[in-house]
Image: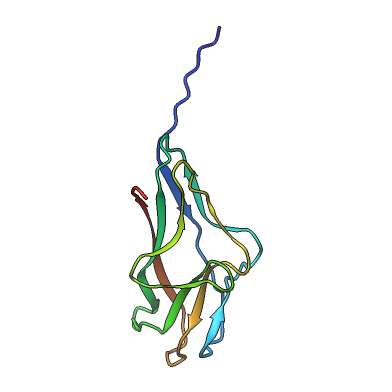
């Protein structure tokens, strides 16, 4: 007789993928899609192995705004992150936490998979900045609290 024991980690593991917006013209009022606008883009892979599936909320904040990566130019640029739940429900992503997903009691947190009309997009509010290559950082955070 074979005796086996299987254990689970009892945690939530999150892994993110880089999001590339490609090379774009800087036009005032331009909404920029991800470079890979294919359907079902898994942006955040989540593995939820908790034994007790309490209410969980997933938040997104801008950790570092867009800046020129040229070491001689640290100009912040007027580009905003916008999170599209669908084409009509939009949240601006700033340095304040923005709720992007939550579970009910007893429910597992699932990976975030975006279609073309969902997910993180960029908006160029003003085009008065130098041309260049720009980079930003985002922070995904979990809050595990009673509902």
Which residue is pictured at 50% across the width and 17% down the height?
A: 4
Please give left or right for residue 31 compared with residue 137 in the image.
right
Where residue 93 appears, as percent x and y from the top left, is 41, 71
Q: How was the colour assigned to the protein in this rendering?
A: rainbow
61 and 132: which is toward the camera: 61
The image shows residue 49, relative to residue 147, as above or below, that is above
Residue 113 image point, x, y percent: 57, 57
Residue farthest toward the front in the current orientation of the protein? 147
Can you give x and y, in whole percent of width and height, for residue 46 in the image?
Answer: 49, 48
Q: What residue is rendered at 48% in x and 24% in y?
A: 6
Can you name the residue that lies furthest to the bottom here?
128
The furthest residue to the top: 1
Q: Is residue 106 above or below residue 7?
A: below
Quadrant where the N terminus sits is: top right
Name which quarter of the figure residue 95 lies in.
bottom left
- In the image, what residue occupies the spot 51% across and 58% down? 17
Q: How many marks?
A: 0
């Amino acid at each position: 007789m074979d005796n086996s024991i299987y254990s689970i980690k009892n945690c939530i593991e999150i892994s993110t993928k880089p999001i590339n917006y490609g090379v774009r013209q800087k036009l005032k009022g331009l909404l920029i899609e991800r470079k890979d606008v294919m359907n079902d883009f898994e942006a955040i892979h989540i593995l939820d192995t908790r034994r007790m599936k309490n209410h969980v909320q997933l938040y997104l904040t801008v950790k570092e705004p867009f800046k020129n990566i040229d070491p001689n130019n640290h100009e912040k640029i007027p580009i905003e992150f916008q999170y599209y739940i669908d084409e009509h429900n939009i949240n601006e992503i700033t340095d304040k936490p923005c709720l992007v997903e939550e579970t009910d009691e007893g429910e597992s947190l699932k990976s975030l998979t975006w279609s073309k009309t969902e997910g993180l997009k960029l908006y160029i509010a003003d085009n008065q900045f130098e041309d260049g290559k720009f980079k930003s950082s985002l922070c995904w955070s979990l809050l595990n609290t009673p509902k």
